[in-house]
Image (cartoon, grey):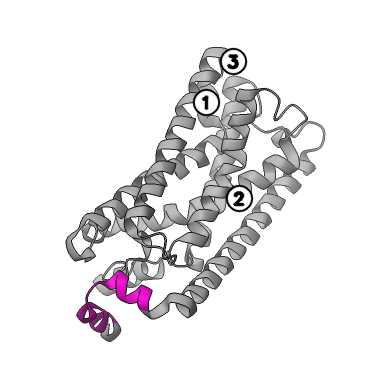
Amino acid sequence: MKRKLSFSYASFGVSTPFDPSFALVTSPLPFLPPSVLGAVRALLAVYTLLAIIVILGFDAAVYGSGPSYLSYFTSLSYIGLCAYFWASGVQTIAFAQTERRICYPLQKWPRPLQLMHVLLYTSIVVYPIIVTIVFWALLSSPQTLEGTFNAWSNISRHILNSVFALFEITCTNVSPPPWSHLGPVFIVLPLYLGVAYITRATQGFYTYSFLDPGSHPGLVAAYVFGIAIGYCIVFAVVKGVITLRCWLSRRRWGSEADAERLGEPEALDEWEEV
C-alpha cells in the first residue's frame, strides 16, 4: 500500500527525495543566482498582491462590484499567480540563505504540500496564457485601455500575467509538468463554470458574455469546448517549451549548473547513484 502511494506521488512529479537538484529554486541563467531569483520572485509577489488590493478596492469603492471580484476566472488565476510567487519567493530566498545551499524548507515538508506546490506551478504557467488569449480574442473592446487605471488594470491582469508566466517558463530550472497534471489542472475550468452560473443566479449577470446561452446555447458549448481544446494545446506547448529550455540549459551550462545547484561534488555523486 505504501509503495503504491509513493508511485502515485512520483507520477505527479513529487520525487523521493523531493527536488534533489533544487530545480524549483534555481535558474539556468548565470545572472540569476538563487539570491537574485528569490528577489525577483518576491518583487513579483509584492506587485501582484498590490495589484489585487488596488483593483479590488477600486472596484468596490467606485463601481460597487467588490462582491463579484472572485466570480471572475481572471481574478482567481491572478490570485494563484500571486500565491505562487509568494511561495516560490520564500523558498528560493530560504535556499539562498542556507549554508552551502544544501536544502530548502519545502523539501522537508509533507508530501501533500509538495504536490500542491508543483500543481500550483503548472497552473500558473498555463492559466495566465489562456486568460490572455481569451481576453484579447473575445472580451476586449476599444475601451479596454481607456483611462490610466483601466489601462494599468488590464495590462497587469491580461498582459503582465503571461509575462510573469513566461519568466517562470524560460528563466528557471523547474522541470516540465508531467502529463499527469493535465487532468487535475483542467478540472478547475469546468468547476469554474459552476461559479459563473451561480453568479448569474445570485447576482444577475454573466461574468463573461460568451457564457450567456441566450438564443444560441450551442454557441456556449462551442466556446467551452474550444477553451478546453485550447487548454490542452497550451499545456502541450508550455511543456514543450520547458523541455526545450531544459535541453538548452543542459547543453549550455549543464555540468557547471548541476554542480552549483547540488553544492558539493559528493552530493552530485550521490544524486547520480540515485
Q: Which residue is mark 2?
A: 129
The numbered disc on residue 63 is: 3
- Marks 1 and 3, the one that precedes in the sequence: 1
Badge 1 element: helix
Dominant secondary-structure state across the stretch colored magenta: helix
> Which of 26 and 5 lies nearest the eye of the viewer?
26
* First to last magenta residue range: 256-271
The numbered disc on residue 55 is: 1
Which quadrant does the N terminus fall into? bottom left
**Alpha-carbon distance for marks 1 and 3?**
11 Å
Left or right of 103 in this view: 46: right
Q: Residue at x 48, y 24 (%)?
A: 54
| Picture quadrant where residue 102 is located | bottom left
Name of the residue lying farthest toward the right: 215
Badge 3 element: helix
Disc 2 residue type?
Answer: Ile
